[in-house]
Each structure stands twice: as structure tokens, then as C-alpha cells.
Amino acid sequence: MKNIFYRSFVPWIPWAVGLTLLFGAMYGISQQVLRQSANDPQIQIAEDTAAAINAGEPVTVFNSQTKTDIATSLSPYLVIYNASGVVVASTALLNGAPLAVPQGVLQSASASGSNGENRLTWQPQPGVRSAIVVIPVKGVFNGFVVAGRSLRETENREDHIGLIALAAWFVSLAAMFGTFAVIEILKKKRMLPEY
């Protein structure tokens, strides 16, 4: 039995490495597709808002009396900052206060090579993670449009896909090892030729 285990294990190793790389790549691709698609609503909101402001729409139009608490809500939100990084219009709050996106996040949207926007994951406090898109506005109004949305459901899906990938990886490794073991048993019983 020990000999069968050893003779099965050696040819299984390169297959195990290949399966590990394959399932790792599949999970990585799935995770990135989910994360990047989490930006889609914010891209539209930020671009449409920036276009409206550039067309002469007053910034105050985008202010909301009822603010979304980003720590508990899945709703998309919008915050408009002036060039100094001060909130001038918002649909969201965090712990009852205006959202304070770091200045570097705003400035990166204006940096050369940024294509005029900044897309990132922002975690203002533990347990609160948002996918945000920042677009600079220059013209009648100089500042930044930030559109965001909670990543809670996206990250739940990523975790679920990770568990599925892990289970499939483990079953595939076990099935592959079992196949090599059966081959070795059949060869030992002379039901398969040695090669």
C-alpha cells in the first residue's frame, strides 16, 4: 500500500501544481470581474454629474436633504467637493458627518496619466468599504465629483466564489490522486500494462 501511495504521489505532483495554478487564476479572474463591474453605476453617476455641472447646472441641485448613511446603505451616493476638498453638495454621510475623502484621492484624478478620473476602493473605517469614482470638474465650477457605492454585496459574492473555487480545487486534487492510485492498483493486479 505504501508503494502504491508513493507511485501515485510522484506523478500527481505536477498535476496538483497545474490544478492549483488553474483554480487560482480562475478565482483571480472572477474576483477582478466582480470588483471592476462594481464601479459601473458610479462611473455613470460621476460622468453624468460632471457633464451637467460643466453644462452650467448649479452644484446645489445635487444636494440632498435626506442623506444616505454609507455605513449601512447599499445605495449609490454622490459628493461634490470644491477645489480645496470641501464638500459643497452631498447625498451621503458617515457617522452623521460629511464624507472626508482624502485629498490625495481627489488630486490623483487630476494627475497626468489618470485619464481624468480615479477609481478605487475606499475604506473610511473598518467594515465600511466603497467602490468610488472621482472625476475632476474644471470650468465654471472647479472641484471634484465623487460617486460611490458599498462593496458589501460584491465582497460577499467574491467570498462565495472563493469557497466554491476552494471546494472544486480540493475535489479535483483528490480525484486526480485517486485516478493515479487506481491506475497503480490496476497495474499491480496486472490489469493494466506497465509503461
Image (cartoon, rainbow, N blue to C red):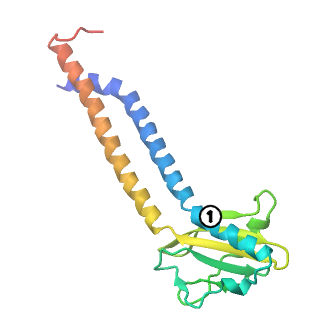
Mark 1: which amino acid? Leu
- Which quadrant of the structure image shows residue 49? bottom right
Look at the picture and state if 195 lies above or below 28: above
Residue in view at x 33 percent, y 25 percent = 10
- Quadrant of image for the C terminus: top left
Residue toward you, 171 or 2: 171
Residue located beneath label 1 in the image: 120
Look at the picture and state if 113 lies above or below 183: below
Query: Is the residue marked by circle 1 packed among few (<14), some (14-19), or many (20+) residues within 10 Å?
Result: some
Whether residue 41 is visible, yes or no, is yes
Asked if residue 57 lies left or right of residue 187, the reply is right
Residue toward you, 136 or 128: 136
Question: Residue 55: image x %, image y %?
Answer: 79, 74
Question: Residue 52: image x %, image y %?
Answer: 74, 74
Residue in view at x 43 percent, y 32 percent = 18
Q: In the structure shown, which secondary structural element does the residue marked by tag 1 occupy? A: strand
Pick out the residue farthest to the left: 189
Question: Residue 97: image x %, image y %?
Answer: 59, 89
Asked if residue 11 lies left or right of residue 60, the reply is left
Asked if residue 52 lies left or right of residue 8, the reply is right
Look at the picture and state if 38 lies above or below 104: above
Residue in view at x 22 percent, y 19 percent = 184
Asked if residue 122 lies left or right of residue 54, the reply is left
Look at the picture and state if 142 lies above or below 169: below
- Which quadrant of the structure image shows residue 159? bottom left
Question: Residue 179: image x %, image y %?
Answer: 25, 26
Residue toward you, 73 or 140: 140
